[in-house]
Image (spheres, grey):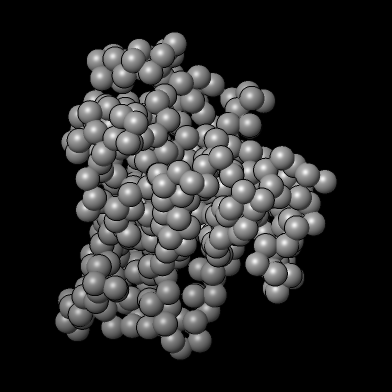
Amino acid sequence: MDLGEGMRAGDVLDGRYRLEETLGRGGFGVVWRATDLRLVRNVAVKVLLEEHAADGEAVGRFIREARTAGGLASPHIVTVHDFGRVPTPSGETHYLVMELVRGRSLADLLKDGVPSSEDALRWTRHVCRALDAAHRCGVVHRDIKPENVMIAEDTGKAKVLDFGIARLLTQSAVLTSTGNVVGTVPYLAPECWSGAGADSRADLYALGVMLYELCTGRRPFRAASAAEYMYKHLEETPAGVRTADPALGELIAELLAKNPADRPADAAEVHRRLRAVRPGVLDHDDPSPEQLRRRADQAWRLGADGAPGQAVAVLPGIIRDLARICGPADLRTLRTCHDLAIWLARDGSRGAAVALLRELVPVLADAPDARADALRDLDHWHREISRGGPGAVPAVEGRPLSLAGLLGGGPQSG
């Protein structure tokens, strides 16, 4: 069957990729579901439209997408496997082989209405992780928008695609050869309109526009032309977002700041603040609170079986995950901090145990039983120190074992 682009279902590209069915069409290419005959797997193949095959700018964008996304490693960036050229009746064109993500774009999902706040926060965090991975490699996406975020139907993960207009942070921000700004106008940061000085914070602005849309069902600005959008992005302040979480509205306002210096420092900071808005919102690859409690119980058994040092080694990571997922003030988190103090003391670090318990007791004011247990152990180990010396104060991964350090940092996995 001829699909009008010089490609037919059943065609095999480079003896390897058999085209099965079209999945969609954009301004530059047609996306196919295809079979990788060598590895026997489904893939997505984007074929550059023949009308653009002789356009150096379009071809450059296509190759840039392959090389840029292909060099990034993140579970939230669509993986690029391969790219090449293929003959057509009028010459040749390029193709790009990618991970096949079965699901819907955020743009498509927004047609169904405003998503739940849990989904909106989860998906935005995933995009933050993708941006963090890109920015750490010196890559600015420059076209973050709902159309470029896919939600996988099997995992619920958000995945960022279309790095075709991405650039390196070391490159200058420039207009296209036709004098147009690069990107999608409803999502373009103020600094992008002048073509000067745009960096990774322009991606954060676009993220703010998208998060505003996920929370309200509409963009912060409506306009009938690119010129009107430019004026509003440069001069107008959007209406605030009314949510049950004031911190979320504040974050969106900061992301939409006109001055890049007034936005969050980076995607990792945005991720952390989104976590703090709703710490109990789990991602599909997050451990559940029950799993974390079982891990804490296993650590306790390590200590009870005569290996308190091993318990001390694993408990800080469990505590940080509990703080991230259940919240730093959750009793499960705080009781695990008490567990750590016990095994610190039994491993010979009584001073560290007493210091941690002293920080913990005031935080347990609303949990009288847990507070009484902590006071009892604090008194016991304080008396032991008075009789036998303070013990060493260890550090784990270079981080002192203070309560603030345990509850306020650690690896982000969602």
Residue 186 lies, with reference to residue 381, above or below; the image says above
Picture mark count = 0
Picture coordinates of residue 204, whole percent (x, y): 34, 38
Residue at screen point 49% across, 82% down: 302
Residue 199 lies, with reference to residue 293, above or below; the image says above
Picture coordinates of residue 233, whole percent (x, y): 31, 20
Identify which residue, 89 or 128, lies in the foreground: 89
Residue at screen point 29% across, 35% down: 175
Residue 287 lies, with reference to residue 264, above or below; the image says below
Residue at screen point 24% across, 33% down: 195
Horizontal side of residue 22 vs 281, given as left or right: right
Horizontal side of residue 282 vs 60, given as left or right: right
Picture coordinates of residue 235, whole percent (x, y): 25, 15
Identify which residue, 365 or 165, lies in the foreground: 165
Residue at screen point 26% across, 62% down: 402
Identify which residue, 158 or 355, lies in the foreground: 158
